[in-house]
Image (spheres, rainbow, N blue to C red):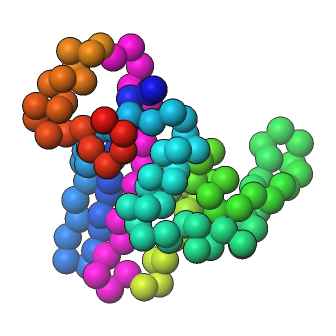
Amino acid sequence: MKLYRVDFEHFAPRGSAEGLLFFTLAEDDEEMAKLIDKLVFGRYSDQDNELLVNPSTEDDSFSTETVMQRITRTRGDLNDDENEQYTPYEDAYYGVTLYGWEEVPNYTSNQIEVLLQLNLLGEGKQ
């Protein structure tokens, strides 16, 4: 199991917020993408039949990927500079919230215990 930190950024016409949402344990980035998809009520998997253009920086060619593949590769729409392809900015009257995650390297069981005591380990496997 790997420890992941999940962050968010919310922006709206009347204000914004960003920060740490929670920590969680997961097997890999694919499991994290599924967890975040569940957090946003299937916003990504609902669009998974749409193919996104993925520009290749190596040889000026393009490839395609599904929304869930993109979310997994970029570790969330918070970390994706081109997330306007699948994030509903046009329906942003109440704001838009983006999520992203990063792996926490070299954690100890004592750190997991502290996260549990602070109620910061959540949403995934514990």
Side (left or right) of 105 relative to 72: left
Spot occupied by residue 79 in the image (x, y as percentages of width and height): 49, 48
Q: Residue 30, relative to residue 4: is it above or below?
A: below
Instruction: Write down the quadrant of residue 114 in the picture.
Output: top left
Spot occupied by residue 96 in the image (x, y as percentages of width and height): 36, 71
In the picture, which quadrant includes the N terminus? Answer: top left
Side (left or right) of 107 relative to 87: left
Instruction: Write down the quadrant of residue 26 in the picture.
Output: top left
Q: Residue 123, relative to residue 40: is it above or below?
A: above
Q: Does the magenta-highlighted stretch encompass residue 119?
A: no
Side (left or right) of 66 relative to 88: right
- Viewer-nearest residue: 64 or 34: 34
Spot occupied by residue 41 in the image (x, y as percentages of width and height): 42, 70
Q: Which residues are magenta?
A: 92-107
Spot occupied by residue 119 in the image (x, y as percentages of width and height): 14, 40
Q: Residue 89, relative to residue 10: is it above or below?
A: below
Q: Residue furthest front?
A: 126
Q: Residue furthest left?
A: 117
Q: Report the residue at 36% width, 39% height from top.
A: 125
Q: Report the residue at 64% width, 54% height from top.
A: 70
Q: Does the magenta-highlighted stretch encompass residue 95?
A: yes
